[in-house]
Amino acid sequence: MARKFEIPSFYRSPIVSTIKAARRSADQMKRDLSPTILDLGPVRFKIARHFGFCFGVENAIEIAYRAIAENLGRRIFLLSEMIHNPQVNADLLSRGVRFLISADGRELVPFEEIGGDDVVIVPAFGTTVEIFERLEKLGVNPLRYNTTCPFVEKVWTRAQALGDRGYSIVIHGKRSHEETRATFSHAQLYAPSVVVRNLQEAKILAAFITGMRPAAEFLAEFADRHSVNFDPQVHLSRVGVVNQTTMLAEETQAISDLLRDTMRQVYGEQSLAQHFADTRDTLCYATTENQAATRALIQAGGDLALVVGGHNSSNTSHLVELLSQHCPTYFIRDPQQIEGGELIRHLRLDTKEVTETRGWLPKKTGPTEILVTAGASCPDRLIEEILLIVAQIFGAQQRLQSAVESFELRLRSHE
Ligand code: SF4
C-alpha cells in the first residue's frame, strides 16, 4: 500500500480525492490511462488519470511542516523554493520560514549569519555538495530536515555507478534548475560531467565526439556546463546519460539514441558497450506517469486544455508542451487566473510571459470538452477550485456534485 503522508488538509480536495480513489480502486495496477470523464451537460471535463502531488512532494511538505511544528521560536530557512508551487512556498513563508537562496542561486541571507541554532530545510530537488558542506561547517545539520526526493538521490546513485565503471556523465537537464545544479555537483564527484539542455545541445556534443567540431571549441561551447578539467578528447570517448527527473520522455530517449548512434559511428558496433553505457533513463515515476496520462488525454481529444502548476515547474511545462501541439492550452497557476468565460491569464512558454486571452472558451452548440491536468507539485485543492469555477461558468455546479457522488458510489462498490 502506498505511504500516506501527513500534509495540511487545505492542500487536499474532497472532489479530486474521491475521483482519484475511485480510479485507484478500480485499477490498482495503474494499467488504465484513459482520462476520467465528468460529463456535466454543456461542459465535459476529461481529467488526466495521473496528476498532482507526487511521493517526493508530499514527503517534502510533511517534513517542512514538521520542521515548523518542532522548532517554534527558532529561525527556519528553506535553502530555496521547496518545490515549484507558489501556494505551498507562500504558505511556508507566511509561517515565518525564509528563503536562503533564490531560484537562480543568489544568496538572499548571507550564510555567515546562519548558525547551529537555526533550522535549514533542504528542498525536494536536493542541493549541491558545496552547500551541504557549508551548512555543516556553520553547525547546521542539513540531514535533519532533508526533503531531497529519493528519486533525485537515485539519479546521483546512477551517476556514481557510471563513474565507477569509468564512464563520463552526460546530464540531460536544465543547467539553472535546482535539481540539475545539485545533480551536476554530485556527478562531478564521481566522473567528468557535462550538462546538455536538449537534443540540439546533444547534437553539438555529438559533433565533438565525432571530431566534426575541434576539441578547442568545447570549453567555450559548454562553458559553466562542464566539470573542472574536462578534456573532451579523453572524457567524451566513454559516456553514460542521466536525466533531470522531470524531462520530456521523448527528448530523453532521442538524446540517448543520438549518443549511442554517435559512439557506434565512431567506434563500431563491436566496441559500443565500451563507449556508451546502455542504461535506462532516470525520469521519476511521476514524470513518466503524468506524461503518459497526458498522451492519453491528447488521444481522447478536447476543445482546449487547462494545465495547472507553478510557472517555473519543469514537469508541468512539459505537460503544456505536449498538449499545446494538439489544442489551445492554458498554463495557469491558480483559479484566480480565470475571470469567467471571458478572460484567462496564462503563461506562454515561448515568451515566458503571462498573457491574457479573451474569449478562451469556444462558442459551440454542443458540449465544450476541456482537458485538465496538473504538475507533480500542484495541490488537488487548486484543481477542485478550477473545476468548480468552470462548472459555474456553464451553470453546471449541481451536475458536478452529482458526477462526484457517482464516483463515491463506485468507490463504495469496490470496498
Ligand atoms: S517530480 Fe519526481 S523527482 Fe520530483 S519530487 Fe516528485 S517524485 Fe520526486
Image (cartoon, grey):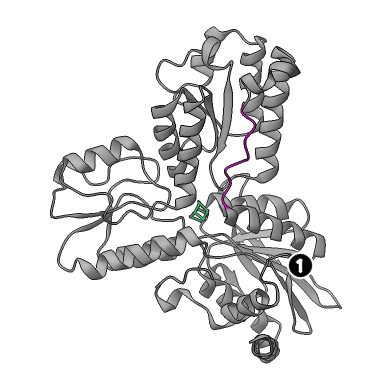
The quadrant the C terminus occupies is bottom right
- Residue drawn 47% across the image and 27% down it: 164
Specify whether residue 216 is in view: yes
User: Where residue 381 sits: x, y (%)?
Assistant: 52, 75
Secondary structure state at the residue bearing disc 1: loop
Q: Magenta part of the protein: which range?
A: 277-284
For residue 138, above or below residue 339: above
User: Where residue 368 sits: x, y (%)?
Assistant: 79, 74
- Residue drawn 32% across the image and 40% down it: 106
Residue sitting nearer the eye, 348 or 16: 16
Residue sitting nearer the eye, 390 or 210: 210
Residue sitting nearer the eye, 370 or 129: 129
Q: Amino acid at mark 1?
A: Ser
For residue 303, above or below residue 83: below
The image quadrant of residue 221 is top right
Specify whether residue 217 is in view: no
For residue 156, above or below residue 266: below
Query: Crowdedness of circle 1 by 10 Å Cα count: few (<14), some, many (20+)?
Result: some
Q: Is residue 290 left or right of residue 153?
A: right
The image quadrant of residue 19 is bottom right
Q: Is residue 192 left or right of residue 331?
A: left
Instruction: Report which residue position mark 1 lands on.
Output: 34
Q: Is residue 195 magenta?
A: no
User: Where residue 266 sits: x, y (%)?
Assistant: 70, 13
